[in-house]
Amino acid sequence: QAQLVESGGGSLQTGDSLRLSCAASGRTFTNPIMSWFRQPPQKKREFVAAFKWSGSRSYYADSMKGRFTISHNGAKAINLQMNSLKPEETALYYCAMAEVEAGTKTEDYLEYTCWGQGTKVTVSS
């Protein structure tokens, strides 16, 4: 079973930038996808971005395109660069990993079987 550890959360102001990191250890998947989700207070968990090693493809939620960039750092780590942050993006940010199979729904958190503990991002106005 893989373990995921996020880092980089913090408190910042509207318009600031922040970089989150996630490192995997232990037994990982053979065809992995690693993603970021977030859960604002009292709201549902939502997809942010994903990186699929096969084909080196990146995916983003529409509202993050152009502001967020996901990148990989070796075979078991990803980063999320977030720019122009807004107060409504205050949330717990989670890293997740899944095995890519036919029909895998990248944006569906139920597809992911491995999760980190989350890192808190607070954006003040």
Image: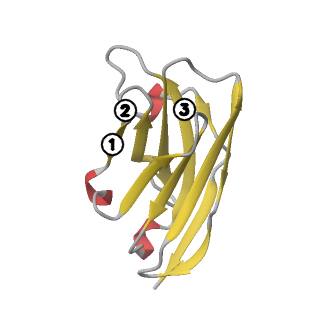
Residue 116 figure quarter: top right
**Mark with earlier residue (3, 1):** 1
Q: Which residue is mark 2?
A: 106
Tell me the kind of residue under disc 2: Thr
Depicted 115 relative to depicted 63: above or below = above
CA gap between label 2 and label 1 equals 8 Å
Assess disc 1: are there few (<14), some (14-19) or many (≥20) residues with their C-alpha within 10 Å of its C-alpha. some
Q: Which residue is mark 3?
A: 97
Assess disc 3: are there few (<14), some (14-19) or many (≥20) residues with their C-alpha within 10 Å of its C-alpha. many
Q: Residue at x 28, y 62 (%)?
A: 66
Assess disc 2: are there few (<14), some (14-19) or many (≥20) residues with their C-alpha within 10 Å of its C-alpha. many
Q: Which residue is mark 1?
A: 59
CA gap between label 3 and label 1 equals 14 Å
Depicted 118 relative to depicted 114: above or below = below
- 110 on left or right of 2: left
**Mark with earlier residue (3, 2):** 3
**Mark with earlier residue (2, 1):** 1
Please state which of the two labelled residues, at mark 2 or mark 1, is closer to the viewer.
1
Tell me the kind of residue under disc 1: Tyr
